[in-house]
Image (cartoon, rainbow, N blue to C red):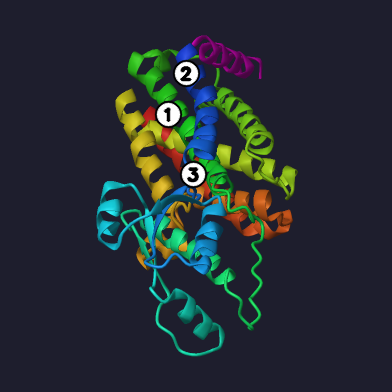
Amino acid sequence: MGGFLSFVKKETLHIVRDRRTMMIALLMPVVQILLFGFALSTEINNIDFAVTSPNRTEAVRRQVERIAANPYFTFKGYIAPNEIDNALRSGRADAVAVFADDYDRQTAATERGEPAEKAVQLIFDASNPNNAAAGAGYMQSILLAGRQTGAAAPETRLLYNPQMKSAYNFVPGIMGLIFILICAMLTSVSIVREEETGTMEVLLVSPVRPIRIIFAKMIPYFLLSCLNLVSILLLARFVLGMPMSGSLAGLVGISLLYLMLALALGLLISTLANNQVTAMLISGMLLMLPIIMLSGMVFPIENMPGILQGVSCIIPARWYIEAVRKLMIEGVPFADVLREVLILAAMTAVLIGVALRKFNDKLE
């Protein structure tokens, strides 16, 4: 046991003295959390809109004021009908609301239940389809709310994320991405570096069994990832305002399981790579793209073709991100994420078994 702890201490000192590794491992999570939490936002804000109205009646002015008072929109003034295309192409406006000549008459007819033509036409720059779709929905709701009708308006409730903050969606995804990159990339590169420089053979002839040497190299990265977990949770709670409404113990427990899975994945990569560059490419490019594209971090899995939904089932980050969202945002009890826990535990056991077997084969 003393020899094992000595190897753990040696690897820990090696990591601490490597300032570049420490900066990457500790600063990258903070930068990514803040970047995705503040700078990269999918929330719709500050949509510039203009208005075309041949008759600027009091009803038209009230509707324009209602739209301009909404924080999602910025009023850029009235334009002529022949200026609409130029305003959208030049970027002076993202949307144009075109009020009909007889807007007041058509609105009154609609309120009486009589058939009427379109009183308002909304023209959006759809080069960004997300902004166009969301902006059109917001503007339509404002225009409808400004009309007096006899029908009762439906009540809409938004659960778990009523402010529609994009950080609530990104933080669990970033956690799934960061832990894979930190654990898998740094662990695989560390082991391959020992093999590339020839020091692994020196370690293997020591009295300590080879498997203990490997675990001794993995433990410091596990502890480093635990520090990242603490920093991410603190930033998410006190800087980004994440609710943390579920079981904190369950969140930490499934995160530790995911860290073990990432370490096993790093060990497996080290058996496939012969040099540090190959290890970086495998753990960086080949892991990052599937996590971003197929884990539900950015794009909903339900919107993917069936074959891609099947492929996403073998992405560990998918199950971790789903569990974290349920525990952190929806506030479900830990029993409701047992399926994700069992899947991650099975993946961890398989990765550890395959990685150790291939590593032993490589040693032989």
* Disc 1 residue type (three-letter): Ser
Q: Indicate the quadrant containing the N terminus: top left, top right, bottom left or bottom right.
A: top right
Q: Is residue 5 magenta?
A: yes
* Residue 271 image offset from top left, x and y in percent: 38, 33
Q: Residues within 10 Å of mark 1 (few under 14, many from 20)?
A: many
Q: Count the marks.
A: 3
Query: On screen, 66 above or below 200?
Result: below
Q: Is residue 220 above or below residue 361?
A: above
Mark 3 highlights which residue?
41
Name the image quarter holding residue 305. bottom left
Question: In the image, which is nearer the foreground, mark 1 or mark 2?
Answer: 2
Residue farthest top in this picture: 17
Give x and y (percent) for residue 87.
30, 52
| Residue occupying the point 70% across, 45% down | 244
For the residue marked with disc 3, what is the amino acid? Ser
Question: Which corner quadrant holds the C terminus?
Answer: top left
- Which residue is disc 1 drawn over? 188
Label 2 is placed on what type of residue? Thr
Q: Magenta span covers which residues? A: 1-18
User: Looking at the image, is mark 3 or mark 1 earlier in the sequence?
Assistant: 3
Q: Is residue 175 magenta?
A: no
Q: Residue at x 34, y 41 (%)?
A: 286
Q: Secondary structure at mark 1?
A: helix
Label 3, secondary structure: give it.
Answer: loop
Please report the residue visible at 42 percent of the width from the left and 64 percent of the height from the top: 303
The residue carrying pointer 3 sits among few (fewer than 14), some (14 to 19) or many (20 or more) residues within 10 Å by Cα, namely some
Reading the image, the residue beneath label 2 is 21
